[in-house]
Image (tube, grey):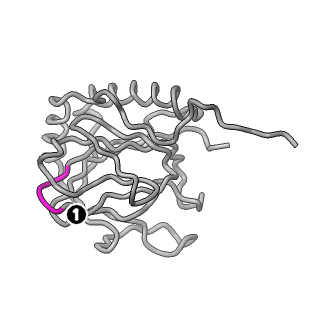
Amino acid sequence: MPLFFEPKWKSYIVVTTTPVLTPEQCDQIITIGRNQPLINARVHMGKPGSKKRQGIDSQKRISKVCALPFKEATSMYKDIERNISSVNANFFGFDGVQITEGGQYTEYEKGGFYDWHSDSSTEMSMMPRVRKVSMTLLLNDPKEFKGGQFQILNEGRSVSLKKGYAVFFASFLRHRITPVTKGNRKSLVMWFGGPPLK
């Protein structure tokens, strides 16, 4: 019976050691995001296998979001595209990863949170767009808020980010944002896809 091992370089959670975006780019994204209509974030509702339906559920998620227009953030998208290409080649090794969805500007004010979830579904009919890698990038100084920790896999695994730094992770991994207890956590969330996983 053959034994198969993943390569030693491979990882499904990558925290950047250099900034993905400059402080000026982060401030620009905040300005662009705040100039868009911010809406209450929605979550998938219903049982697995049910028709896709989204709604507001304050037991699962409280945050404000908007889509980040490509036209107004062209240089940012180019920098992130370079980063995901490098991160994928050096850590994930997924096939054909690229930007397949626009970015999401997100604010978590005091009391805001997002409970445990993954960014891809086990029900393929619920997730026609293939998401392979997700990214959360912190847009503001972490001194501007308390709480709002990004946690992945379990409660003990928190990721600390600085302004302009990001965590890239396989979209099927469970993660959450703990409740913000003071201030306002501002982030950019993106998903990268490609051909179906195989």
Q: Which residues are magenta?
A: 181-185
- Residue at x 66% of width, y 37% of height: 6
User: Which quadrant of the figure contains the C terminus?
Assistant: top right
Label 1 crowd (10 A; few <14 / some 14-19 / many >=20): many
Q: Nearer the viewer, residue 140 or 54?
A: 140
Q: Residue 61 occupies which quadrant of the picture?
A: bottom left
Q: Which residue is mark 1?
A: 112
Q: Is residue 105 above or below residue 109?
A: above
Location of residue 107 with respect to 44 vertically, above or below: above
Residue drawn at 25 percent across, 42 percent down: 138
Q: Position of residue 103 (x, y in %)?
A: 32, 42
Percent x, y for residue 191? 42, 43
Quadrant of the image for the N terminus?
A: top right
The answer to if 183 sits in the magenta stretch is yes
Residue 153 against residue 4 in the figure, above or below? below
Residue extending furthest toward the right: 1
- Foreground of the two, 120 or 37: 120
26 is higher (above) or lower (below) than 179: above
Residue 19 position, x and y percent, is: 28, 29
Residue in the foreground of this view, choosing between 23 and 35: 23
Question: Which residue sits at x=20%, y=48%?
Answer: 186
Residue 147 magenta-highlighted: no
Q: Residue flagged by tag 1: what amino acid is it?
A: Gly
Q: Would you say 116 lies left or right of 161 here?
A: right
Left or right, 158 with reference to 69:
right
Which residue lies most toward the front here?
A: 156
Secondary structure state at the residue bearing disc 1 = loop
- Report the front residue among 61 and 173: 173
Which residue is pictured at 25% across the width and 63% down the height? 179
Most common secondary structure along the magenta stretch: strand
Q: Position of residue 120 (x, y in %)?
A: 50, 54
